[in-house]
Image (tube, helix red, strand yellow):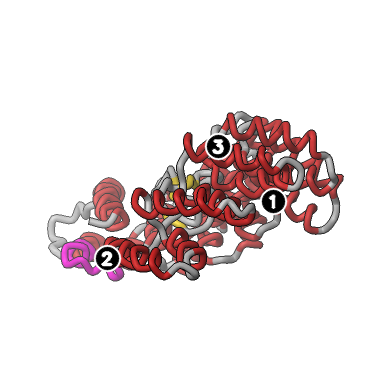
Amino acid sequence: MDIWFFLLILAAIIIGWLLGRWQPFSKSAGRQQADPFSERYAKGLNYLLAEDSDNAIKIFTDLIEVNKDTIEIHIALGNLFRSKGEVDRAIKVHQNLLARPNLTRKQRHIAIAELASDYLKAGLLDRAEKLYREMIELDADAILAYRRLLDLYITEKSWAEAVDCAQVLYRKGDAEAAVTYSQCLCEIANDAIEGGNNRLARKSLDRALEVDPGCVRAALLLIQLLLHTENLTAAKRIFQRLIRQSPEYMPLYIEPARQIYLNRESRVYQDFLQNQYREHPSTRLAMALLEHYARNDEIGTARQFLSDILHKSPSFEAFEFALRFLKSNPDQLGETWETLSHFLKSIQDKKIEYTCARCGYESHAIQWLCPSCRNWASMKPVRL
């Protein structure tokens, strides 16, 4: 049973109780006509039992007069409309409530919050934003308002506004605020780097790492910025700390390592790849090693390593490299084709490289904001 249908049943029970409490029974002994309210209520129940929720909601909505004692029921009915996707009807119910002069302060705050949720679901972001700002001014569940505003600004990619909201939540001790705050700062830093504003980028990244010292994205962006400004010593220091702190993101560290070590210390870069492959074997590291061996004419080492990979941990990347690398040696290509055939037969699903640790969402590329559960920095590389 859907949750909204369960809530509708619950609302019908409450409505029946209220009718029994408020509708006066006729004191005239000669009056035999049935109470019209009871008849309409019974009709609503029949619709409900027949799972005709549209007509049931219409009757229950018309049946209950809006007053201080029935506000919660109308709010519940409006929420049912919204959860069912009938946002226009939900908006009308909640707007009608806010037009009432006899609402208590708490009831008005609840109605504002629900109407803001209606606007948000309808995609009327400017109206939702205005109501959430009103909630903050009224001190009506300001934490909720800031959370909703934060999500709204992230959706709109309004990063400056998102940072302001995340900062408020962070200072108020919100459990998820540190990660979100640092990721929004990374968005600003990324745009600043692309726009050539290194000062803003550095300021944003320093703050991101202050808020969330474990922010891998901020560290990678800072390394990128330091390399761009030719501050190799600082870049190397942050890079080495990053490896110790978050080794699970090793596939993302290959390019920074190449930039830091390769053009200056080729042997150090090779040692780095070999050591990391022993400790955290992955296709990305294997391919980086193969390409490095090939570039440095270490043909024998490359062939032996390639043979090991194709038998122990075959991948599309490894076979692509093998076909390029061994094209001048037909004898070895025959063995490679046979191995490739077995490998292709074992592949059933599309290759996944990153998985969300929170909801399990799968992706072939890193996404710092999970599209499914909308948690920041929850995507982790899949070891292949």
Percent from the top left, x then y, of residue 313?
Answer: 37, 50
Closer to the observer: label 2 or label 3?
2
Whether residue 163 is situated above or below residue 342 in the rendered picture:
above
Mark-to-mark CA distance, 2 and 3: 43 Å
Mark 2 neighbour density, 10 Å: few (under 14) some (14–19) many (20 or more)? few
Name the N-terminal-most of marks 1 and 3: 3
- The circle on residue 176 is 3
**Image side of residue 359 versus residue 130, left or right:** left
Residue at disc 1, secondary structure: helix
Region in magenta: 44-55
Tell me the residue at 49%/47% (across/down).
379
Is residue 344 at all visible to an observer of this figure? yes
Task: State the residue in front, 278 or 82.
Answer: 278
Mark 3 or mark 2, which is nearer the start of the sequence? 3
Q: Position of residue 24 (x, y in %)?
A: 27, 51
Is 103 above or below relative to 211?
A: below
On residue 345, the disc is 2
Mark 1: amino acid: Glu
Q: Which residue is mark 1?
A: 187
Type of amino acid at the residue the image marks with label 2: Lys
* 253 vs 211: above or below: below
User: Where is residue 312 drawn, in percent x and y?
Assistant: 35, 48
User: Marks 1 and 3, Cα distance to the nearest angstrom?
Assistant: 17 Å
Circle 1/circle 3 CB separation < 8 Å: no
